[in-house]
Amino acid sequence: MNRARIVLATLNRGKVLEIERLLSGLAVELLTREDFETWPDMEETGATFEENARQKACTLADWSRVAALADDSGLEVDALGGRPGVRSSRYAGEEGDSQANMALLFEELKEIPDDKRQARFVCVISLCSPDGKRLEIRETCEGRITTEQRGASGFGYDPVFVPEGMDRTMAQLSLEEKNAISHRGKALRRLRSLLEKGEPAWLFV
């Protein structure tokens, strides 16, 4: 089986580390922004996680002429009708302002009791070839929203999300614990199982 090359369509170092760890030991060379002199603009204009992941992966694959892996992930809160959803990273306005996003989430949930704060993290990963072939995987992590931030690990909404069956937030878990249950961890393990079998075949040509 030929060694495959995949470029990761993210500038988030936390995501890069998770992906590198979960796909380590495979016949796959992972490339990042650091391996290129320039980098394309990859807008997220889709209405769904699937559309956004596909848009980023296919844009980068076409630009780099290397198979590209992108994920779109976010938080869905039942009491808010599924918000913040695809706008999770820019919920409060500025892209990636986690503190502002969590503050707005608490404000919108301030009248919601503990037993009505169910939520889930969603992750869709898209692997796209330079000629448009695609593989997509969707996974979730069920849980609930806290009333205060706890923990210093992770990123995004991790300090306010308690996974189902646990009493610690995602930000209080070790990276190994988080990867075992997280939406992205589940999706990447499914991808890893395919890559170990030489699938998708077009990646290893």
Image (cartoon, grey):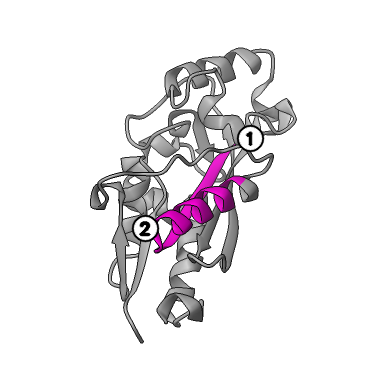
Kind of residue at disc 2:
Val
Label 1 secondary element: helix
Task: Tell whether position 64 is magenta.
Answer: yes
Q: Position of residue 25 (x, y in %)?
A: 28, 71
Q: Which residue is mark 2?
A: 7
Front residue of 61 and 30: 61
Provide the residue span drawn in magenta. 52-76
Q: Residue at x 65, y 41 (%)?
A: 46
Mark 1 and mark 2 in contact (Cβ < 8 Å)?
no
Q: Is residue 181 visible?
A: no
Q: Position of residue 22 (x, y in %)?
A: 36, 61
Q: Residue at x 30, y 44 (%)?
A: 38
* Mark count: 2
Kind of residue at disc 1:
Gly
Task: Tell whether position 96 is magenta.
Answer: no
Q: Is residue 169 visible?
A: yes
Q: Which residue is mark 1?
A: 85
The mark that comes first in sequence, 2 or 1, is: 2
Q: Is residue 201 left or right of residue 17?
A: right
Circle nearer the viewer, 2 or 1: 2
Quarter occupied by the C terminus: bottom left
Quarter occupied by the N terminus: bottom left
Q: Is residue 15 left or right of residue 37?
A: right
Q: In the image, is residue 110 above or below residue 126? A: above
Packing grade of label 2 (10 A; few <14, some 14-19, many >=20) is many
Q: Is residue 184 left or right of residue 111?
A: left
Q: In the image, is residue 3 above or below residue 77? A: below
Q: Position of residue 34 (x, y in %)?
A: 24, 47
Front residue of 115 and 46: 46
Q: Is residue 191 left or right of residue 81?
A: left
Front residue of 6 and 76: 6
